[in-house]
Image: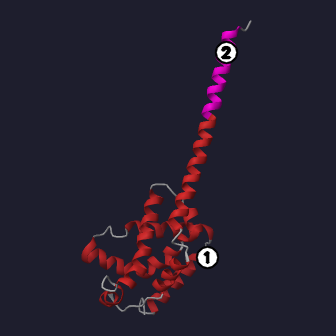
Amino acid sequence: MVDIIEVSAIVTAAGVIVGVIYYIINLRNSIKARELETTRLVIADYISEQGLQRWATMMTMQWKDFEDFMKKYGRFNPEMFAKWASWFFAWEVFGVLLKHKIVRAEEMHDFGGYSAIQAWEKFKDIIQSFRDIAYGQDMFSNAEWFAQEMLKVKMKKDASYKAKMETYRKTLEKLGKHE
């Protein structure tokens, strides 16, 4: 025979199990909402009209060598410096968020993170010069990592992109890298 104490214990245990399940579901939803909100906040400027204008300006920059780059786009030309550096600082932040699993690579890619791929190809020698001359090998290392992660996602989504990247690299080389 089942007495009232046993029924009470079963009801209590069931209540605890339901409470734990509710807590887990609520926690998962909160984490997803936080990820989405963080991603939205991080990319707000990134996908704005001004952000896209900065990116277009950055991708049309031309230089002969590091010295020429510094004259045209270095800190002594704050307007042009801000156009390219703001993007690399944004990708640096994206890389940190991605490494700490605050955002997901696929989401960042889908929100335009793939733009880091070609930008890294174009600017990697300049960044390496900055690393060698003044700032150390960790300068924009998270931005570099972010670009590599975006390339991995891009290759999963579009295997033909590898050929496109090779064409882009050859075009940069033909143009003397940046002219």
Q: Nearer the viewer, residue 75 or 171?
A: 75
Magenta segment main secondary structure: helix
Percent from the top left, x then y, of residue 145? Answer: 43, 66
User: At 58% across and 68% down in the image, what residue appears?
Assistant: 111
Q: Amino acid at mark 2?
A: Ser
Percent from the top left, x then y, of residue 36? Answer: 57, 57
Q: Residue furthest left?
A: 134
- Disc with the residue nearer the chain's start (2 vs 1): 2
Query: Disc 2 marks which residue?
Result: 8
Q: Is 51 one of the magenta-colored residues?
A: no
Q: Nearer the viewer, residue 173 or 109?
A: 109
| Image quarter (top left, top right, bottom left or bottom right) of the C terminus | bottom left
Q: Which of labels 2 and 1 is toward the front?
A: 2
Query: Disc 1 marks which residue?
Result: 160
Q: Amino acid at mark 1?
A: Ser
Q: Judge left or right: residue 35 versus residue 14.
A: left
Image: magenta residue range: 3-20
